[in-house]
Amino acid sequence: MLKKDGELLLEEFAMEAYPKSIIKVSEGIYHVIGYGHSNSIVIEGKSSLILVDTLDSSYRAKIMKEDIEKITKKPVKTIIYTHGHPDHRGGAGAFKDTVEEIIAFAPKRAVLKYMDKISDVLNRRTARQFGYELIDEEVITQGIGIREGHAINEGKYDFLQPTTIYNEDVVERVIDGVSLKLVSAVGETDDQLFVWLEDSKVLCCGDNYYGCFPNLYAIRGGQYRDIATWVDSLKNILSYPAEALLPGHTKPIFGYKNIQDILGNFTGAIEYILLQTLDCMNKGMSEDEVVAKVNLPEEYKGKPYLGEFYGTVDWAVRSIYGGYIGWFDGNPTNLNPLSTNVYSRKMVEFIGGEEKIINEIKNSLNKEEYQWAIQLCDLVIDKNSEAKRLKAEGLMGLSKLITSANGRHYYIACAKELM
């Protein structure tokens, strides 16, 4: 979302969303937030600890470990990964001397064959999205948590592979006297699970909920995230009588009614965006037309946990459009469009030359019409060094307006590449 005070809103969110703390949730259960980019949950057994996720680096996990030892000296013998994202597994190495079992769920959908063939571009886009190559002054926040350790010299990913991988939808275990249920919950990832602790009415929900609008599409690129299934998983979570909801990022939610209200609105907002997008598509609207049409309704606008500080509604709509019907929007003009180079050359000729375009770009930048300016830049950027500089200026302007940390990083990273 682009807003006049987008940068300020993102700063305010970052100050509030993940204060460094170890919160005692109930007897023997602790929620660790702000120690890393992701959270961790510590569950005390008879003689050992169960760790749900491990932070993003072993350096940070060791700091967490030292602080947990001030509460209990029991060793970590079991690790549960809520999903395979590296920021949740990267601290596992800190516990390699004591851990005996590492539990995960297998993905419910296979990764597309040959994804490794596009690893270079995906890695490049990932670095842009997360701001890995930016300095602290340029990165307000990594969206749903502090910057990852490897980006600021606070350790690297230190993975330990799962020793137990389940293909079932539901697994019930008793681990060192702790009864728990592991439930498949496909959403942000296809291997996502949540952990239900019935005795204490605590639910660890991984990344299917965090306190802002979710990343229904990641601009780094990847396979379509099945939003309908994500909604189903959230509804399943809502069916449990949880008194504490512990997410993989941002602060916990306490109280059954509070959880039902917040998670219910979160679920409702996602489902609304999905169904409204499909309805508009069914009416024959193009992708851009659907993006212009679909917005959060009044009942969800202004909810602090639906702020577009990570994912955005517009990106979600575009992902749904492509996920359901592919690239073609139904307009025959777009079946065999001119190449970008030919289209740009003809537009430059039609407008009256590069000088006119450059002048209009400068005027647009002065009026803070950044999007129009950068789209004009793309007409001449291949052969015009001034257009590269002006596009960088436009991207930096947009970075001040966008509320999404991911979008901000991408704008700034690409601007620096042009400088």
Image (cartoon, grey):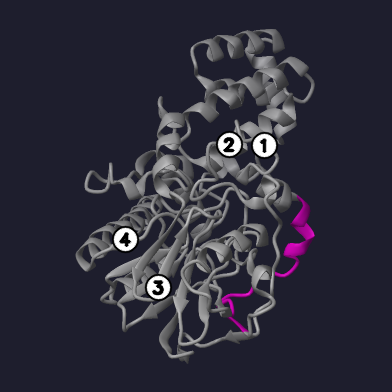
Is residue 384 part of the magenta span, yes or no?
A: no
Where is residue 410 drawn, in percent x and y?
61, 38
Q: Disc 3 or 1, which lies upstream in sequence?
A: 3
Which residues lie in the magenta part? Answer: 101-120
- Gap in Å between the C-alphas at discs 4 and 2? 27 Å
- Kindly identify the residue that appears in the image at 43 percent across and 40 percent down: 15
- Gap in Å between the C-alphas at discs 2 and 3? 33 Å
Do the CB atoms of the residues marked 1 and 2 lie less than 8 Å apart? yes
What residue sits right under mark 4 in the picture?
253
What residue sits right under mark 2 in the picture?
139
What residue sits right under mark 1 in the picture?
134
Query: What residue type is disc 1 on?
Result: Leu
Q: Disc 1 or 2, which lies upstream in sequence?
A: 1
Do the CB atoms of the residues marked 4 and 3 lie less than 8 Å apart? no
| 199 relative to 374, above or below | below
Q: Disc 1 or 4, which lies upstream in sequence?
A: 1
Residue closer to the observer: 192 or 115:
192
Where is residue 389 drawn, in percent x and y?
70, 19
What residue sits right under mark 3 in the picture?
29
**Mark toward the viewer: 4 or 3:** 3
Residue closer to the observer: 388 or 28:
28
Q: Secondary structure at mark 3?
A: strand
Query: What residue type is disc 4 on?
Result: Ile
